[in-house]
Amino acid sequence: MQTSDHLADQVYFVPITPWSVERVIEQERPDGILLSFGGQTALNCGVALEKKGVFKKYGVKVLGTPVKSIEYTEDRELFVKKLTEINVKTPKGKACTNVDGALSAAKAIGYPIMVRVAYALGGLGSGMCRSDAELKEKASQAFASVSQILVEEYLYGWKEVEYEVVRDAFDNCVTVCNMENFDPMGIHTGESIVVAPSQTLSNSEYHKLREIAIRTIRHLGIVGECNIQYALDPNSEEYRVIEVNARLSRSSALASKATGYPLAFVAAKLALGHALTDVKNSITQVTTACFEPALDYIVVKIPRWDLQKFKHVRREIGSEMKSVGEIMAIGRTFEEALQKALRMLGTGMEGLVCNDIAFENLEKELREPTDERIFAVVEALKRGYSIDKIHNFSRIDNWFLYKLRNIITLEKSLRKLSWIRLNREILLSAKRTGFSDRQIALIFGKSELDVRGLRKKFDVRPYLKQIDTLAAEYPAKTNYLYLTYNAQESDVSSPGQVMVLGGGAYRIGSSVEFDWCCVNAVMTLRKLGYKTTMVNYNPETVSTDYDICDTLIFDEISFEVIRDLWELEKPLGVLLSMGGQIPNNLALPLWKSGVRILGTSPASIDAAEDRHKFSKLLDTLGIDQPAWKELTTIREAKRFAKNVGYPVLVRPSYVLSGAAMSVAYNDETLEAYLHLASKVSKEHPVVVSKFITGAKEIEIDAVASKGELACWAISEHVENAGVHSGDATLVLPPQRLYLETTRRIKTITKAIAASLRITGPFNIQFIAKDNQVKVIECNLRASRSFPFVSKVFRVNFIDVATKAMMGKELPKIEKSAFELDYVGVKAPQFSFSRLKGSDPILSVEMASTGEVACFGDDLHEAFLKAFLSVGYTYPRKSILLSTGVPESKAELLEPCRRLQLRGYRLYASAGTQQYLSQNGVKCAMLHWPLSGEKPNIMDVIRERKVELVINIPKSLDRKELSNDYQIRRAAVDFNVPLITNTQVAKLFLDSILSRREKDLKLKPWHEYR
Amino acid sequence: MVVGKTSGIASLVLKDGTVFSGISFGARTSTAGEVVFNTGMVGYPESLTDPSYAGQILVLTYPLVGNYGVPPHDVENGLLKFFESSKIHIKGLIVADYSREYSHWNAKSSLSEWMAQEGIPGISGIDTRALTKKLRTHGTMLGKIEQPGKTIDFYDPNKENLVAQVSPKEVQIYGTGKTRILLVDTGCKNNIIRSFVSRGAKVIRVPYDYDFTKKAYDGLFIANGPGDPKMCTATIEHLRQALVQEKPVFGICLGNQLLALASGADTYKLKFGHRGQNQPCIEVGTKRCYITSQNHGFAVDTKTLQKGWKEWFVNANDGTNEGIIHSNKPFFSVQFHPEATPGPVDTTWLFDRFLRIVRGGR
């Protein structure tokens, strides 16, 4: 959203690094700069620029919190010193600059100890250590990327509480929201289930910590917004301040959504020098922003993990952040909010109970939390563990455990009832405890619609309540709403005309792109004069800003809830093709139940999603596709694989981000994957198809109206087919496609659009080999790459799509809009460094957690900028190569030769070295990690003697290739850029050979048109 | 909430005929009073024992109540350590989701047990937001909590001298400091006394109608308390005489209204009052804003302030008076509660300021 042109006068798609930001400052000469709005990346960059004297040099004023204050919060030693000055307690600890120092500090404090890393986003490298050995490992990893770590007392089991604080330049200081972690100290707050406001704190504790927050923030001199985290002893009022984040954070986004207090908006005003008292409360538009919201509901946040997507990854959660997104649920009881929240995660859970989940070692699950701990607590309660026993294992406060038990007790009593004895009072009580229709249906062996019917009969329905920041004390002007059964009336009845469904939790495969699509759809709808209702529950999104739409409903996106809202709001129709797969999956059931779906008919959506129907359609249209078969038995699958020849691709239909999608190279792996695939989706069949190697992958993002193509964008992948499209590097317009291929793709797209009578956004993926084009996937919804193609072409595809879906006249698009003098490159951002143990390779399963887009005058420039933006550094001296199969070796030979001529020092594994030297490229041979011989690859990486590691896996099979895995993992752990794909490696090397870093032009977006 | 547990049904009946039904907790008795709402999210043991709530049925807008139980009845310096007076003063409690189980290191009983012991009924399972909106629109209303088969008449506490009911009958002394603060107890919260004593003052706590004009003291303090300030004629009269002496005077809440009345200004009843912990008050003439704890249904009419007096604090939300101060004499008072409990402690500096003046400083 930030890179939309209506948000800023000038937008740059460039890396947030001191080097490039300085160049932008040099070009733009701004008067002021804001450092605290872009998270840790922006903050670190700002601090570096200040140290380099860049702001001084160009006369740029740092607005809001001064850099000095940021340094107080980032340098642990300074932080402790500043807080001690005002008698505020911090954990006992010592800042250390080397491993020996850390060991002696640990000895003084006593194990277990906590290691914290300065300047780290999401607690990277932090963690608990029980022994010298553990500390040694952790510390040496940390020192690879930072110069200072903190060894401190371990406050295991203390309550974790945080406050969001706002302060203006006139010393007005308020705490906007406090939050309490369900999971106590030891688990990063980003990894914890969090409630707002705090639930187990007395007045004395609540206001004591609030007072300390204000005292601390004043003393540190923060202006704007910040977050302060505490550990609070569960047996007294002892506390420690854990940290202060002198910037807006994930917690601030959560606090804003939890309270309705727009923290970023207010912080920006304060940074510009406004007084808090002069800023109005945007909800009431009458009262002042200088107040503390009073909530009359409870908010539950749960992180969304995707750990199962990573091979080898450790599933334990702790002081490092591994989650990729989060959701927030609102209710008027904890039980209601929690059950909603667990469903919102979209991990297949029905709520707290009625789930199919089992634990082998329950006590271990309770003691060493994984992403599934809350279900382990449920299991323990069901097995009759006492509350105190569970508390002793998990340290979760008894209050939360009692509440979980309430849900389990209710489930038990429901199970004792027969369907006919289910009366209004009991049904209402189940709904008030957060049970979904599906959960009740499962308990009674009925269908979801049966339960809905019974609810109708008894008039048991949810009500819409407002979030108004003042607990109903003053009337609210905005419609920020949630649903609750703990009510007897709705606050509002404001029928929105068009209901737009959002994308839910950010997770691998669905992120901010869909937020952009939703917001743009809403903006177009409003321009067209429709009253809009947005439904979404992800606190990190713009689509859940209540001023984006006419009505925001912060609630579940499920059949039950949307059907209820349909009855409550009676809109003209529902728009569900903007939010990705979650809303798209509801198309058919909602349509069947009488809800009007805007745009492409749900029957067509189903025809594209259902592989069987879609394949038949392609056959009818004479469009080629890889050979495939719907699976009924494993024996059949094996026979099919034998017929078409390995490798084959295994996938369930109705998936996003390639859940359980895998390539099998032989019978053995095929069998293993099939078991996994059938576990993921029971309702939809599993498909096995021929996997074509060495092919190019191409996709088209397009909009059609009544089956006619309105606009389209063809992008090519840098990587060959086999890398998930979400992990692929996209190039637009394509630079290496045959004209014939492009024409063929367009013809196919037109035919599909016409036969499915598409009205709205859609995306088709193709593979092309030797001028043959095959369709591999088609989604009749906005895709992940819609924002990218819209921004490259400067044609808003969502605007066009929305108009098409509303039956409005489409904007005329000049043909020249698609003829560009520049290139756009979209590159994936990976988070392997946070996912300890995971194997950082690309495959058919998506693993990236974000993306960037950059522009350039040619492919090399755009590609380099994009890769520098996702954290690669420009290598100047030395590169390590182990280039896998002969084909890869051959492909990389030429660039290696040129690198050598440029004076790069090349290191290579034995095979690669042999190949290179046979072909006249000199390089130093290193031994494989497991050989233990010197000179060893691991030493070179550990000592960071190389600036880039290129390690190409020998095959796409995910079988553990120990040596390769060791190299890749070490590169990630020691923060050395890593490339594992041949095509990417070649393009990267070609790019550095064609462009020096200082030759990269940092032009604003508007110059690319 | 949980099926199978037989919970008693009780209902809240408002004067306009609206009935809310819910589940009974606390004492199974019927009660009547004035229904008011408080938007604070913590501090029910403190609120329930605040004498300013005398005669009122309290609605808590925060839905989850009872989570951390009720602290022990420990006594410190002659006062209950964790409560604001010696008993519950509300007539009844209305909540959305009462938590039967509680968890806190300092809890000795559940909220329900404590209320039952003190004979105070409560109802849970009420749409307190709907109720609050009704009170906000119609203004504070009379209401009653009725248990099945136990009907009761409406009761208007504003027709009674509530201060007389909550004020002590005897003089009590707290602390041993040299500075003598004469505290006129119109329904004083314990933390006001604690705030003086912890700052080294001696508190002479006298009944609301006690004639203190002849008594030796260094500073005069007028406490908070329930009901219409105009009922406290005796206090107002004594105060008027005291103002002639020019010894420092400080008032909180009802004390603010009484000081205004004694100075010749007027007070009026607010539609639904201010009860909560998030009320922003601006110090007049500055950009400084304080977040304050409040509990009042009446306010000073700023327009009627007499010569020499000026508005000191103003409510940033609705512009009502939050404090008055004399231009050249050491008299001042605030409508909010600097002693907090419950609520934010941003304005405890007012105690320091008052004592500084009492001790001869500025």
Image (cartoon, coloured by chain):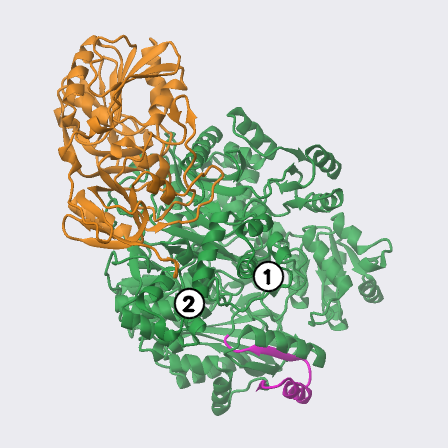
Chain colours: A green, B orange
- Residue closest to the far right: A933
The amino acid type, in three-letter code, at marker 2 is Leu
Residue range highlighted in magenta: A629-654
The answer to whether residue B271 is left or right of residue B123 is left
Residue at position x 42%, y 45% from top? Answer: B67
Any part of residue A976 in sight = no
In percent of width and height, residue A530 lies at 26, 65
- Residue A725 x %, y %: 56, 70
Q: Residue furthest front?
A: B149
Q: Is residue A998 above or below residue A412?
A: above
Determine if the magenta segment contains residue A641: yes
Q: Is residue B161 above or below residue A737?
A: above
Q: Which mark is residue B337?
A: none
What chain is tagged by disc 1? A
SS class, disc 2: helix
Give percent across and percent down for residue A959: 72, 70
Q: Which residue is mark 2?
A: A414
Q: Could one spot residue A454 in this view of the protein?
A: yes
Q: Chain letter of disc 2?
A: A
The N terminus of chain B: image quadrant: bottom left
Query: Mark 1 is on which residue type?
Result: Leu
Q: Is residue A751 magenta?
A: no
Question: Where, by quadrant of the figure, is residue A108 drawn?
Answer: top right
Q: For label 2, count other residues whose C-alpha is less than 10 Å away and answer few (under 14), some (14-19) or many (20+).
A: many
Mark 1 closeness class: few <14, some 14–19, many ≥20 residues within 10 Å? many
Looking at the image, which residue is at 43% across and 62% down?
A410
Q: Which residue is mark 1?
A: A307
